[in-house]
Amino acid sequence: MMRTTDIESTCPSCGSSLPAGTKSCSNCGANISATAQIDSGMSAADKESIQNLAALVVKELKKGTDEATVSQKLLEMGMDQSNATQFVNDIRAQATKLAEQEQITIESYSPALIGAGLAAVVGGILWGLIVIFSDYEIGIMAWGMGILTGYAVVKFSKGKKGVPFQIIAVLASLVGIIIGKYISFYHFLYQAVAADSGGEAAANITIFSGAVMKIFVNEFGSLVSGYDLLWLFLAVSTAWSIPKGLGLKGRI
């Protein structure tokens, strides 16, 4: 098995190439962790090996396994004692730092809600307009809504993650999908009324009309196909996964 010290590393701060096993950069003084070697020009197989080890360590630490036991698992996989201990310590420090950065605060709720709301409205309008101009409903846009709202929540909250923000992202993705559906529904309803009763009658129908909204609600079931449900599932699952935190909760 490849050892972490078998790989030349690169300083994550200044980009200097460093000998294998270097603990600090001789150029800028930055600390060089074992996991920093993942991005240091290794082969795809070597990168995957290190990433898998890091994932294993995080998984064990989340379960509450102590560092000595995790290091022992790495020893059994072929890593030597000093490298195993250092690797576990590095992963523990980085995961703990990331968990602290992701921790939701009261102040982060407002930005997350604003980001989710903007993503839902802007994404919904864009989807509706695309349907109108293409005269075709592109289902993958619903999936895009999940991606957009998920990233908006994380971006606006400056990297905060957790179940409350996952719920916000999911609800926002659903709102965005409904907005997109409603805009295209209104457009085609307007065209139908204009064709049947003339432009003057159609002019009396506004997008914010209570009557139009009532018709939309009553007809919503017929507007959603089994194919739509697939994209809806992808949108919701994606919106849920993007703001998902490490789940460490300060345990490690």
Image (cartoon, rainbow, N blue to C red):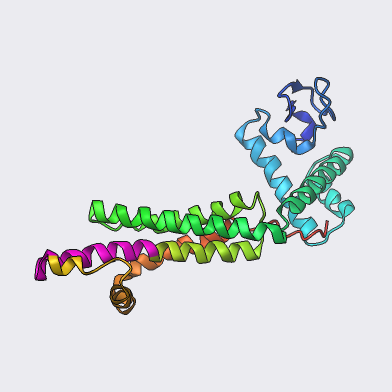
| Quarter in which the N terminus is drawn | top right
Say which quarter of the image contains residue 26. top right
Q: Quadrant of the C terminus?
A: bottom right
Q: Please state which of residues 206 and 146 is positioned toward the viewer in this rendering.
A: 206
Image position of 10 (left or right of 83):
left
User: Magenta residues: mostly which secondary structure?
Assistant: helix
Residue 140 appears in the picture as rendered: no
State the image coordinates of residue 113 (x, y, percent, origin top left).
57, 60
- In the displayed structure, 195 sits above or below 93; it is below
Q: Does residue 194 belong to the magenta stretch?
A: yes
Q: On the rendered structure, is 224 left or right of 96?
A: left
Residue 145 visible in the current orientation: yes
Magenta stretch, residue numbers: 179-199
> Residue at 55% of width from left, 55% of height from top?
115
- Rendered position, 127 above or below 221: above
In the displayed structure, does residue 5 sit left or right of residue 166? Answer: right
> Which quarter of the picture shows residue 49?
top right
| Membership of 84 in magenta stretch | no
Compared with 35, 6 (above or below) is above
Who's the residue at 60% across and 35% down the image?
Answer: 44
- Residue at point 66%, 30% (across, down): 42
Residue 46 at what x, y percent from top left?
66, 35
Quadrant of residue 214 within the rendered picture: bottom left
In the picture shown, does residue 12 fall above or below 97?
above
- Residue 133 in percent (x, y) is at 24, 51
x and y, in percent, of residue 175 in the image? 45, 65
Total numbered badges shown on the rendered structure: 0
Taking depth in this image into account, of 220 and 252 the one nearest to the observer is 220
